[in-house]
Amino acid sequence: MIIDIREVQDINSFYRVESLKWVYGIIWVLAPIFTLVLGITIGVLVIVWLEREISAGLQQRIGPEYSGPLGVLQALADGTKLLFKENLLPSRGDTRLFSIGPSIAVIAILLSYSVIPFDYHLVLADLNIGVFLWIAVSSIAPIGLLISGYGSNNKYSFLGGLRAAAQSISYEIPLTLCVLAISLLSNSLSTVDIVEAQSKYGFWGWNLWRQPIGFIVFLISSLAECERLPFDLPEAEEELVAGYQTEYSGIKFGLFYVASYLNLLISSLFVTVLYLGGWNISIPYIFVAELFEINKAREVFGTTIGIFITLAKTYLFLFIPITTRWTLPRLRMDQLLNLGWKFLLPISLGNLLLTTSFQLSSL
């Protein structure tokens, strides 16, 4: 049997090309995900640095200044320290639940970033039910906190997990009703369509002006969902030591720390998308590309400006939750639940009814 060498070489080259196509296909799928995760990580580090600088300014302190220029590497140093600390397990706790709880909290919040549009063509998954996906996925995170509290075999941890679950249920309903009102105004549940609906009338077309009551309710509910002061009852130091994270150390404690800031960032991004016009701004910026005759780069320039505008609005809004942390006292548990069920829920329902009536009358 005579084998032609050329045929063998052709077969080998064919398989090589096919395998390269397969590898490139995997890289093409994973590259946007890794880029988004890297951007989120940098965003969290920026939030930690901002919070420390703003807190220091409010309390007339200096703040971080030794780790890198202006102390920007302090958060990275803290994360590295937690990474190398000993990972302790409670002797009488459920180690499987204890280990899986922080992962559930972080993964549930990370999945929410897939529907955030940073520009018209820059969104990981433009789904028709984008905002509802965020609400559904973010409601999984308190389950991770409850699992962590139960698996720790510690009464303080378990009480913290129960408080986190009760708080999430109480404030998720007003939050969802506010999102429903926005979707009624935009005739869509897609985050990209909601931003596009606001861009028709420029600055005055933002949902902030069309839904001022909904914006206030959404702001309060998102603060409660992020467990920020004055709603940090699940981890109240004076009552529960550290709440559901009392028994945690090392990287697992670091995961809870990252999850809280991830949740804060996603809430601010959704405020930007739902109420502040997303990547749109009333100032025409495309003329810069035309001025320097770089028409081919106009789309890249527009995308870059869109990302910058989205992040600028997000980080400007972050001043509100950071300043409230050092301004307002912590509520009692009964006050927190009363605020959610007796005030925010009726107000958000009334806001939804008004929005529905307005939309029906305009048909």
Image (tube, helix red, strand yellow):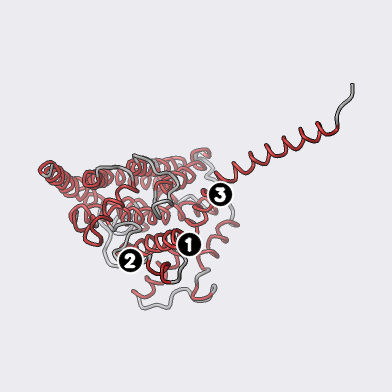
Residue 15 occupies which quadrant of the picture?
A: top right
Whether residues under marks 2 and 1 lie with C-beta atoms below 8 angstroms apart, the answer is: no
> Residue under circle 2?
284
Seen in the image, is 181 located left or right of residue 156?
left
Query: What is the secondary structure assignment of the residue under circle 2?
Result: loop
Residue type, numbered disc 2: Pro
Extreme left residue here?
Answer: 361
Query: Residue 303 in the image: x percent, y percent?
Result: 43, 59
In primary-sequence order, the first of circles 2 and 3 is 3
Residue type, numbered disc 3: Ala
Residue type, numbered disc 1: Ala
Determine if residue 303 is in view: yes
Question: Within 10 Å of the Cα at label 3, are there few (<14), some (14-19), or many (20+) other Cα atoms?
Answer: few
Closer to us: 78 or 159: 78
Closer mark to the observer between disc 2 and disc 3: 2
Question: Within 10 Å of the Cα at label 1, are there few (<14), some (14-19), or many (20+) other Cα atoms?
Answer: few
Give the number of marks: 3
Closer to us: 291 or 273: 291
The residue at 47%/73% (across/down) is: 64
Query: Residue 25 in the image: x percent, y percent?
Result: 59, 41
In primary-sequence order, the first of circles 2 and 1 is 2
In primary-sequence order, the first of circles 1 and 3 is 3
Q: CA distance from mark 2 to mark 3?
A: 31 Å
Identify the image quadrant of the N terminus: top right
Closer to us: 262 or 105: 262
> Residue under circle 1?
297
